[in-house]
Image (spheres, rainbow, N blue to C red):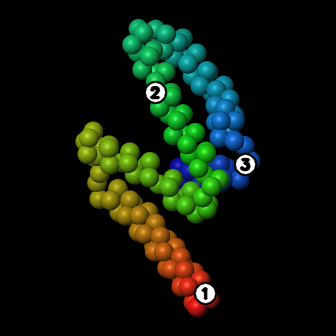
Amino acid sequence: MAFSFAFYGLIKKTIKLNALRGLALETLFVMPAALAYYVYLFAAGEASFLHSGSSTDILLVISGAATALPLFLFATGAPLIPLYMVGFLQYIAPTLMLILGVLVYGEEFNRINVISFSFVWVALAIFTASKVIEARSVRKGRLNSQH
């Protein structure tokens, strides 16, 4: 998962496409797998879309839009910020999902999970501290050169 987040962030940062075209290409890329899975679900009698009532269909369409909007906003913003910040921001969604799973849905969060999670966030804290120190030294250098 870490590789996929890093690779996705790098691609979003470096490919020179506007956000809407990039999102359209991503959708086209995964559509064959999604359609194949839907055909499988339909054949197994487990498909929901267009088979479980209009309220389910509406919720499924809305959930697609709710998924696409953050992806569009990310694709719009990623080229505008440094790559290290893109990588840092990639940890927000999984962290929020973890918190939601543990606090709302009662998912297990044992000692191994705490240790693993702590390694990631301690590393991010060290990285963030180094960037803050770097920014302060650059700012001091600019202030000293102005006087």
Q: Earlier in the sequence, mark 2 or mark 3?
A: 3
Inspect this view and state whether residue 130 appears: no
Task: Count neighbours of disc 2 (C-alpha within 10 A) and say few if under 14, some if 14 to 19, many if 20 or more.
Answer: few
Secondary element at tag 1: helix
Q: Earlier in the sequence, mark 1 or mark 2?
A: 2
Q: Is residue 82 above or below residue 127?
A: above
Which residue corresponds to the image point at 56% horizontal and 85% vertical from the top-left? Answer: 143
Question: Where residue 114 appears, x then y in whole percent?
Answer: 32, 59
Inspect this view and state whether residue 67 appears: yes
* Image side of residue 133 versus residue 115, left or right: right
Q: Is residue 131 above or below residue 74?
A: below
The CA span between labels 1 and 2 is 53 Å
Closest to the camera, between mark 1 and mark 3, is 1
The image quarter containing residue 107 is top left
Which residue corresponds to the image point at 53% horizontal and 12% vertical from the top-left? Answer: 42
Circle 2 is placed at which residue position? 63
State yes or no: discs 1 and 3 in contact (Cβ < 8 Å): no
Circle 1 is placed at which residue position? 146
On-image quarter of the C terminus: bottom right
Question: Where residue 112 appears, x then y in whole percent?
Answer: 34, 58
- Give whichever of 91, 71 is nearer the camera: 71
Circle 3 is placed at which residue position? 15
Q: Amino acid at mark 1?
A: Gln
